[in-house]
Image (cartoon, rainbow, N blue to C red):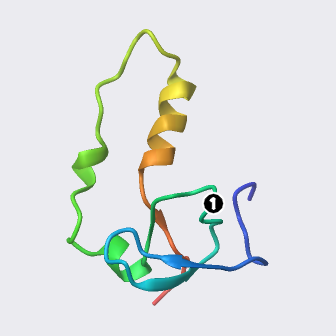
């Protein structure tokens, strides 16, 4: 529930297609936001975010880096 936002909406562009979208994520904090349909489609390759585990860094440093690079879905919905 810490990351849940139901009260603030932002207008931005989909990082994959460039279409104008409404999102619950602040575009100034999250640079990679995808439209819901594009995020769930086969237009992208989820394996491009895979990295080798680096033993010189902590797990949480690497996890934070991964979370910042993986595209966020604009809005959660149940279609």
Of residues 66 and 29, which is closer to you in this image?
29
Q: Give the residue at x 75% y 76%.
A: 8
Q: Residue furthest bottom?
A: 79
Residue 14 in picture, x, y percent from top left: 42, 75
Of residues 67 and 1, which is closer to you in this image?
67
Question: In the displayed structure, does residue 42 sit left or right of residue 61?
Answer: left
Q: Residue furthest top?
A: 56
Q: Give the residue at x 54% y 77%.
A: 12
Question: In the displayed structure, does residue 42 sit left or right of residue 73?
Answer: left
Q: Give the residue at x 30% y 32%.
A: 51
Task: Determine which quarter of the picture holds residue 23.
Answer: bottom right
Residue at disc 1, secondary structure: loop
In the rendered image, the quadrant that contains the C terminus is bottom left
Residue 63 in picture, x, y percent from top left: 50, 34
Residue 1 in picture, x, y percent from top left: 74, 59
Read off the residue under disc 1.
28
Question: In the displayed structure, does residue 4 sit left or right of residue 40?
Answer: right
Question: In the displayed structure, does residue 77 sit left or right of residue 71?
Answer: right
Residue 56 in picture, x, y percent from top left: 44, 9
Task: Determine which quarter of the picture holds residue 28.
Answer: bottom right
- Is the residue marked by circle 1 packed among few (<14), some (14-19), or many (20+) residues within 10 Å? few
Of residues 51 and 30, which is closer to you in this image?
30
Q: Give the residue at x 23% y 48%.
A: 47
């Amino acid at each position: 529930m810490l990351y849940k936002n139901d009260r603030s909406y932002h207008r931005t562009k989909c990082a994959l297609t460039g279409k104008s979208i409404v999102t619950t994520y602040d575009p100034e904090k999250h640079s990679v936001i995808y439209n819901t349909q594009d995020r769930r489609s086969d237009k992208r390759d989820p394996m491009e975010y895979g990295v080798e585990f680096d033993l010189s860094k902590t797990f949480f440093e690497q996890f934070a880096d991964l979370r910042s690079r993986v595209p966020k879905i604009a809005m959660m919905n149940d279609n």
